[in-house]
Image (tube, rainbow, N blue to C red):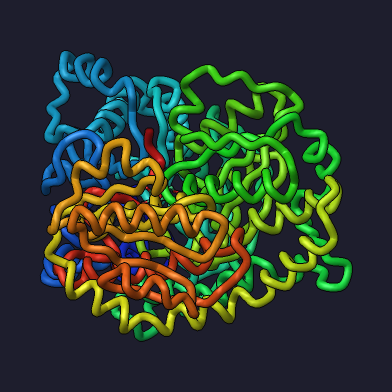
């Protein structure tokens, strides 16, 4: 949510900032802006819309600077328009600020500052930071920018990733972090502050992940990490390992399609080196030292949001069936506020692609404060959740840029399957069941590859239904969460109203919606619930609903029940979500394309939701 970049060095800051903003545009894309220091003054350019539109006006300006900052916005306070776009400035344009997060006490601060004569231009919470710095500077003209930022941070309440510059302490960038990601890039004679390392990987791979409650100062000659009182701290340098081509489209028209097609590799990578095919066991290095505590767990609570929550639901089925440990799955946003009863012998697993989702992070902190073991299942290496949890497992899906999550979901499910097996080895899982599970996991990347070959068939289904206004998705057992995920994918990127339900619940409400205009997508795999789902299909047909079915290869019976049947390869029941989810991802993708929607950057959404 919001992309942030600050640069100080020897190169042209404008090019570096604009390229970085384009990379981070998936984080927020309603408006964008930059500020650069030229001859001791700031030039600020900002506007509603995409980075490419900002670039057009900047190109006309012929700006030259080696120090500046830029921002892509996902609006919280104030509409997405030119004025509310970041950067924000103080009264005289001597301070510039970009911000990701929410200043919760902005209203009272604003009133106070207004009474002192400050004139505000925008409706944002962020602008208050620029004026507050101006006001503190007026009272302490002898102090430098970092000292003044430290005083300012004592007055604001909320969450922030802040990047700040001032003309009266030029050639310096001050950054601060609380609750929103902030990463320093350490180059040769150049330094960066970004909310996402992908923005700078062609310039440097050496990064410092700022912790919550830390500030940093970047100058042309170096950087230093400080606490919020401006006292110097030691900082560890990490290295980014992914490559530029992993964050580019690589010939695909959209990131989402590229990421759907990457799933044979991403699933494989989420298992690489973890499964011992001889002993039929799994080793997840990040949690192996906590195995005893996991096995003694009275119960496992899984907390997550969005697609990650759906993966958690599949995890519930997997862990209960294979590890025989009771599992509860919670929306992180509900869990954190309902005063949950958490015992020290509970294990809380938080699942997050970005590792930055505010509610999931808060759930992890809540669980940790109550003494539970907190395990993270995360994609983004070095993210806040990855660093704050007691232990964890990276899913290794690689960078996911499309806002609608696809390959992260299947990699999360694959990791949960491995966790279930790892624990099951110690909780009495039958050896034949173990063997069947390991054998099936091994073949999944190939089966995913074969499932992807169905793409043209799925596109044909999309062409038939893309003008529908409602969709229903139904599945049972392991494929109930897949039905939810299919509906979510469609809503997110095509703006068609869609609902997912456990198939048997259909008769308790959704059946009232069915008529000849209602497409109903069934997941009807030949598993333990197959015959029940067939009955549900009959019930929809009897009411003239239009039936699309995801079924197994070799199931001929189903052909006469449905208008469209997509036949996927057969695997064991617990791993079917890894295959059944793929046609549903493709269906929503093609429908969104046919409706001319912005697939990778759907309206109102953001990839990484760092505000509550
Ligand atoms: C946002 C994204 C979803 C994602 C959810 C949770 O809503 O648009 O795709 O599933 O956040 O994100 P996380 O990074 O925690 O998995």
Q: Image point 48% across, 73% down: which residue?
A: 552
Q: Is 191 in front, or is 609?
A: 609
Is residue 305 at least partly visible in the picture? yes
The quadrant in which the C terminus is found is top left
Locate residue 380 relative to residue 452 in the image: left or right. Answer: right
Q: Position of residue 323 (x, y in %)?
A: 75, 46
Q: Where is residue 382 in the image (x, y as percent from the top left)?
A: 60, 53
Q: Where is residue 121 in the image (x, y as percent from the top left)?
A: 12, 34
Q: Where is residue 93 in the image (x, y as percent from the top left)?
A: 20, 41
Q: How many marks?
A: 0
In this rendering, the answer to whether 437 lies above or below 298 is: below
Locate residue 227 relative to residue 113 in the image: left or right. Answer: right
Q: Image point 27% across, 60% down: which residue?
A: 601
Q: Is 140 in front, or is 149?
A: 149
In this rendering, the answer to whether 286 lies above or below 234 is: below
Q: Image point 26% across, 47% down: which residue?
A: 74
The part of the image, by quadrant, that contains residue 205 is bottom right
Is residue 11 at least partly visible in the picture? no
Q: Image point 78% across, 54% down: which residue?
A: 422
In this rendering, the answer to whether 557 lies above or below 456 is: above
In this rendering, the answer to whether 528 lies above or below 502 is: below
Q: Is 397 in front, or is 447?
A: 447
The part of the image, by quadrant, that contains residue 130 is top left
């Amino acid at each position: 949510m919001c992309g942030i970049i600050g640069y100080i060095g020897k190169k042209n800051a404008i090019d570096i900032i604009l390229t970085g903003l384009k990379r981070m545009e998936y984080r927020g894309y309603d408006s964008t802006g930059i500020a650069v220091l030229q001859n001791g003054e700031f030039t600020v350019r900002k506007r509603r819309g995409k980075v490419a539109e900002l670039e057009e006006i900047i190109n006309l300006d012929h700006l030259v600077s080696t120090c500046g900052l830029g921002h892509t916005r996902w609006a919280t306070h104030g509409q997405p328009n030119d004025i509310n776009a970041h950067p924000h400035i103080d009264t005289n344009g001597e301070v510039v600020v970009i911000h990701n997060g929410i200043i919760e006490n902005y209203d009272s601060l604003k009133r106070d500052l207004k009474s002192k004569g400050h004139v505000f231009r925008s409706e944002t919470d962020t602008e208050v930071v620029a004026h507050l710095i101006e006001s503190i500077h007026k009272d302490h003209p002898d102090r430098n920018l970092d000292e003044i930022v430290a005083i300012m941070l004592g007055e604001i309440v909320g969450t922030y990733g802040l990047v700040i510059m001032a003309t009266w302490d030029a050639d310096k960038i001050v950054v601060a972090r609380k609750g929103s990601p902030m990463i320093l890039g350490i180059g040769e004679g150049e330094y960066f502050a970004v909310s996402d390392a992908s923005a700078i990987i062609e310039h440097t791979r050496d990064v410092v992940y700022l912790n919550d409650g830390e500030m940093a100062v970047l100058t042309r000659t170096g950087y230093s990490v400080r606490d919020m009182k401006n006292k110097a701290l030691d900082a560890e340098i990490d290295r980014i390992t992914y490559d530029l081509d992993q964050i580019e489209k690589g010939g695909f028209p959209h990131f989402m399609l590229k990421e759907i097609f990457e799933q044979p590799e991403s699933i494989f990578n989420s298992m690489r080196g973890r499964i011992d095919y001889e002993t039929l066991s799994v080793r997840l290095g990040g949690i192996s030292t906590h195995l005893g505590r996991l096995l003694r767990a009275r119960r496992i609570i899984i907390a997550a949001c969005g697609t990650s929550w759906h993966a958690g639901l599949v995890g519930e089925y997997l862990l209960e069936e294979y590890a025989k440990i009771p599992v509860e799955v919670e929306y992180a946003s509900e869990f954190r506020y309902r005063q949950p009863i958490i015992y020290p012998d509970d294990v809380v697993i938080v699942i997050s692609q970005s590792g930055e989702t505010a509610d999931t992070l808060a759930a992890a902190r809540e669980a940790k404060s109550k003494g539970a073991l907190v395990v993270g299942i995360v994609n983004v290496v070095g993210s806040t959740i990855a660093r704050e949890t007691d232990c964890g497992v990276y899913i290794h899906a690689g960078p996911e840029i499309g806002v609608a999550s696809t390959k992260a979901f299947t990699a999360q499910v694959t990791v949960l399957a491995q966790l279930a097996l790892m624990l099951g080895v110690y909780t009495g899982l039958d050896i034949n069941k173990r063997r069947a599970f390991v054998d099936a996991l091994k073949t999944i990347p190939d089966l995913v590859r074969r499932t992807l070959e169905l793409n043209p068939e799925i596109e044909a289904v999309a062409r038939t239904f893309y003008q529908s206004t409602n969709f229903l998705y139904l599945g049972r057992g392991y494929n109930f969460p897949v039905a939810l995920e299919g509906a979510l994918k469609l809503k997110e990127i095509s703006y068609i109203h869609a609902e997912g339900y456990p198939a048997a619940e259909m008769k308790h409400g959704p059946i009232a919606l069915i008529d000849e205009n209602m497409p109903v997508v069934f997941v009807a795999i030949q598993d333990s619930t197959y015959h029940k789902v067939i009955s549900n299909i009959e019930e929809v047909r009897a009411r003239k609903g239009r039936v699309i079915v995801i079924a197994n290869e070799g199931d001929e019976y189903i052909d006469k029940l449905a208008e469209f049947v997509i036949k996927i390869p057969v695997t064991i029941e617990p791993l079917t979500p890894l295959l059944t989810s793929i046609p549903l991802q493709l269906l929503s993708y093609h429908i969104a394309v046919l409706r001319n929607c912005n697939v990778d950057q759907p309206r109102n959404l953001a990839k990484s939701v760092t505000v509550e």
